[in-house]
């Protein structure tokens, strides 16, 4: 959902680079999961206060009360528990649900499995690993992705096997 960029001020605030479509949306989640430098497992931090600051956010979380403590979180990914996320609306999916889905053409040709969804500015790209070892990048736009069936774990695309 975001990344801690740097300490901000002298009271443990941090500058945060949000990865949400609307930067302030991250402030709507009261509990963030982050890993302090040197720790493998993320810990939960309760959001005390936050606000927009330019194209980023500044935020204060419980238990981080100095610039030194905030510096230990620099570079940490900010995650939110899946249960805290609202359900996707009809016709929408969370990009995190797509890895592992089989990618097939409208004609039923299997192109491979979604390895990841990469954000490349204008639109996301499906990174598809083929059984033949080929790797494909398919734009995640309605012109090429014609259907997603999460129950069946299938993404249907208007794409040719030799692209």
Image (cartoon, grey):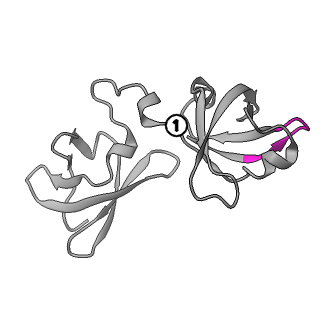
Magenta stretch: residue 8 in it? yes
**Residue located farthest toward the bottom when viewing the structure as drawn:** 133
Range covered by the magenta-colored residues: 5-12
**Residue located farthest toward the right when viewing the structure as drawn:** 10
The residue tagged 1 is 80
Q: Circle 1 sits in a helix, a strand or a loop, which is it?
A: loop
Q: Is residue 114 above or below residue 29?
A: below
Magenta stretch: residue 99 in it? no
Crowd class of label 1 (few under 14; some 14 to 19; many from 20; radius 10 Å) = some
In the rendered image, the quadrant that contains the N terminus is: top right
In the rendered image, the quadrant that contains the C terminus is: bottom left
What is the x, y in percent for residue 157?
21, 49
Going by the image, does 13 lie left or right of 130? right
What residue sits 53% from the left and 47% below the top? 121
What is the x, y in percent for residue 113?
25, 60
Going by the image, does 80 lie left or right of 96? right
Q: Quadrant of residue 17?
A: top right
What residue sits 28% from the left and 42% below the top? 143
What residue sits 49% from the left and 45% below the top? 122
What is the x, y in percent for residue 46?
65, 31
């Amino acid at each position: 959902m975001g990344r801690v960029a740097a300490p901000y001020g002298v009271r443990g605030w941090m500058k945060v680079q949000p990865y949400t479509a609307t930067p302030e949306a991250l402030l709507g989640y009261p509990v963030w999961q982050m890993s302090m430098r040197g720790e493998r497992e993320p810990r939960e931090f309760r959001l005390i206060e936050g606000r927009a600051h330019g194209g980023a956010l500044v935020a204060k979380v419980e238990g981080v009360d100095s610039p030194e403590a905030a510096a230990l979180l620099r570079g940490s990914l900010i995650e939110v528990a899946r249960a805290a996320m609202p359900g996707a609306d009809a016709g929408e999916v969370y990009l995190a649900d797509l890895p592992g889905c089989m990618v097939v053409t409208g004609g039923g040709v299997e192109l491979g499995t979604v390895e990841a969804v990469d954000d490349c500015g204008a639109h996301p790209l499906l990174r598809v690993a083929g059984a033949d070892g080929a790797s494909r990048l398919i734009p995640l736009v309605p012109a090429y992705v014609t259907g997603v069936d999460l129950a069946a774990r299938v993404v249907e695309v208007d794409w040719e096997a030799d692209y």
